[in-house]
C-alpha cells in the first residue's frame, strides 16, 4: 500500500486519537526521555535526536504501510497524553513479527493508571479490523510489564511465544485482526 494514507481521527469518551503534529514534539520528546515511561521499553531514556527520528517514522508508516500510530489527546484539555496504534518495525526477533500489524501503546507518566491505554486501543483495534492488513495483530511486551500485559489481556491478545529482544525477556502476543475489541 503506497501513497499517503488518510490518517483517521478516532474518539473515545476521554480521548481523541489523531495524527501526530509538529507541535506535539516537545511533549513527545519529554515522554520518551522519562525513565518511568521507558522502564520496560528499552530501559534507556531517548535523547532528543532519537525521539525526533522516532517521531518522524510515524508519517512513514502511514505513507508506506497504510497504518501507523495515533497521538492520544485529552479531549478536555487538548494535552498530549501518549500514543499508540500499529507498526511493522522489521525487528530482529524470533519468532518474527514482520508483516503483521504490531500493536503498541505508551502514555506519558502523568496519564498512567487511568485506564487510558485500553480506552484508546479499543477504537484503534476496531479501525484495524476494518482497514488493516493480514490475519492477525501482534504485540511484544516485556515480561515484567504487568500493566501492559493486563491491558493486552483485556484487549484479547494471547501469548503465543516468549523471546528476547535487545537482551530483555519478552512475551509475544497476538489476536485475530478482525475480532472486535
Image (cartoon, rainbow, N blue to C red):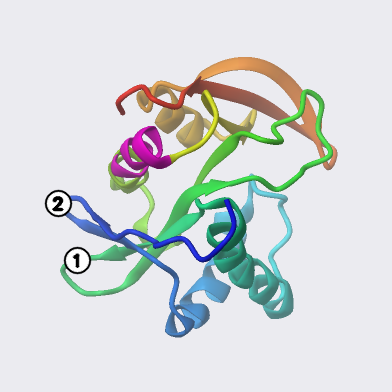
Q: Which mark is residue 75?
A: 1
Position of residue 52 in the picture relative to residue 129 (left or right): right
The question of residue 128 being in magenta is answered with: yes
Quarter-wise, where is residue 58 in the image? bottom right
Q: How many marks on residues?
A: 2
Magenta: main secondary structure: helix
Reply above or below: 32 against 68.
below
Quarter-wise, where is residue 99 in the image? top right
Q: Foreground: 120 or 176?
A: 176
Q: Residue at x 59, y 57 (%)?
A: 2
Highlighted range, magenta: 123-131
The question of residue 169 being in magenta is answered with: no
Q: Which mark is residue 13?
A: 2
Q: Residue at x 55, y 56 (%)?
A: 37
Reply above or below: 178 against 87.
above
Do the CB atoms of the residues marked 1 and 2 lie less than 8 Å apart?
Answer: yes
Amino acid at each position: 500500500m503506497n501513497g499517503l494514507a488518510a490518517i483517521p481521527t478516532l474518539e473515545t469518551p476521554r480521548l481523541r486519537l489523531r495524527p501526530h503534529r509538529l507541535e506535539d514534539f516537545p511533549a513527545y520528546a519529554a515522554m520518551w526521555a522519562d525513565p518511568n515511561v521507558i522502564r520496560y521499553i528499552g530501559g534507556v531514556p531517548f535523547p532528543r535526536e532519537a525521539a525526533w527520528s522516532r517521531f518522524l517514522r510515524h508519517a512513514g508508516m502511514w505513507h508506506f504501510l497504510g497504518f501507523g500510530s495515533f497521538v492520544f489527546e485529552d479531549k478536555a484539555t487538548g494535552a498530549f497524553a501518549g500514543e499508540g496504534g500499529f507498526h511493522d518495525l522489521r525487528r530482529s526477533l524470533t519468532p518474527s513479527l514482520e508483516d503483521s500489524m504490531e500493536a503498541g501503546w505508551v502514555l506519558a507518566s502523568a496519564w498512567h493508571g487511568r485506564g487510558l491505554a485500553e480506552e484508546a486501543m479499543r477504537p484503534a483495534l476496531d479501525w484495524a479490523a476494518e482497514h488493516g492488513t493480514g490475519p492477525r495483530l501482534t504485540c511484544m511486551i516485556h515480561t515484567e510489564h504487568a500493566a501492559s500485559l493486563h491491558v493486552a489481556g483485556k484487549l484479547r491478545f494471547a501469548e503465543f511465544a516468549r523471546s528476547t529482544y535487545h537482551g530483555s525477556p519478552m512475551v509475544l502476543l497476538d489476536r485475530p485482526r478482525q475480532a472486535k475489541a
